[in-house]
Image (cartoon, rainbow, N blue to C red):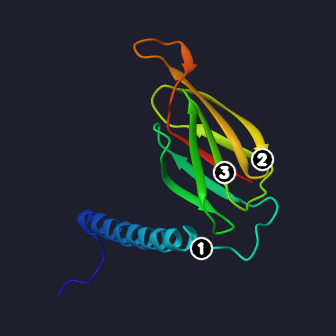
Amino acid sequence: MRPFSRLSPAVVLSAFALFFALGGSAFALEDSVLRSHVEGAAQPRCAGGAVRGIAVVTAGGQLSSRFNCTGRAVQVRKVGGGIFEVRFLGNVAPRATATALGSCSGPVTLDLLGPGSFRVYTRGCSTGGNVLQQVDLPFVLVAV
């Protein structure tokens, strides 16, 4: 019988693959459990400096994902071409940041309409051109 003096490269590679496969499954499970607790669950309070709200908005003005630390609704209204209003009900977040999603997204600017209410302006490439114009783009808004 031969002792384990050396491991073959195939055994080492398969051990790494097994390790990463198990770790990835655990991460996916943890992410789904976290997501089920975050969406729609009220926190004891909305602490200053914490993320108080998240809105992922499609180019058509629909919410694809949302979070409000108060547990109340998040409302989105399309005002015009590339202009949206986002409200986190019961939330007094004084500031936010937003990022446009897409292959030709430009800067996103925000106006504070009131506590927890923001107007979002998205800019991107016009159809067939490289000029940044006010256009409907999907975006993520994070209120703090």
Q: Which mark is residue 87?
A: 3
Does the residue at mark 1 contact the one at mark 2 (Cβ under 8 Å)?
no
Considering only order in the chain, which callout, 3 or 1, is on the residue closer to the N terminus? Answer: 1
**44 to the left or right of 33:** right
Q: Tell me the CA gap for discs 2 and 3.
A: 12 Å
- Residue displayed at 52% across by 25% down: 135
Q: Position of residue 128 (x, y in %)?
A: 40, 13
Q: Report which quarter residue 139 is drawn in.
A: top right
For disc 1, the marked residue is: 41
Q: Nearer the viewer, residue 108 or 20?
A: 108
Residue furthest out toward the bottom: 1
- Residue displayed at 65% across by 73% down: 42
Q: Nearer the viewer, residue 90 or 58?
A: 90
Amino acid under label 3? Arg
Does the residue at mark 1 contact the one at mark 3 (Cβ under 8 Å)?
no
Amino acid under label 2? Arg
- Residue displayed at 76% across by 72% down: 45
Considering only order in the chain, which callout, 3 or 2, is on the residue closer to the N terminus? Answer: 3
Q: Report which quarter residue 107 is drawn in.
A: top right
Query: Pointer 3: residues within 10 angstroms few (<14), some, or many (20+)?
Result: many
For disc 2, the marked residue is: 95
Q: Tell me the CA gap for discs 1 and 3.
A: 17 Å
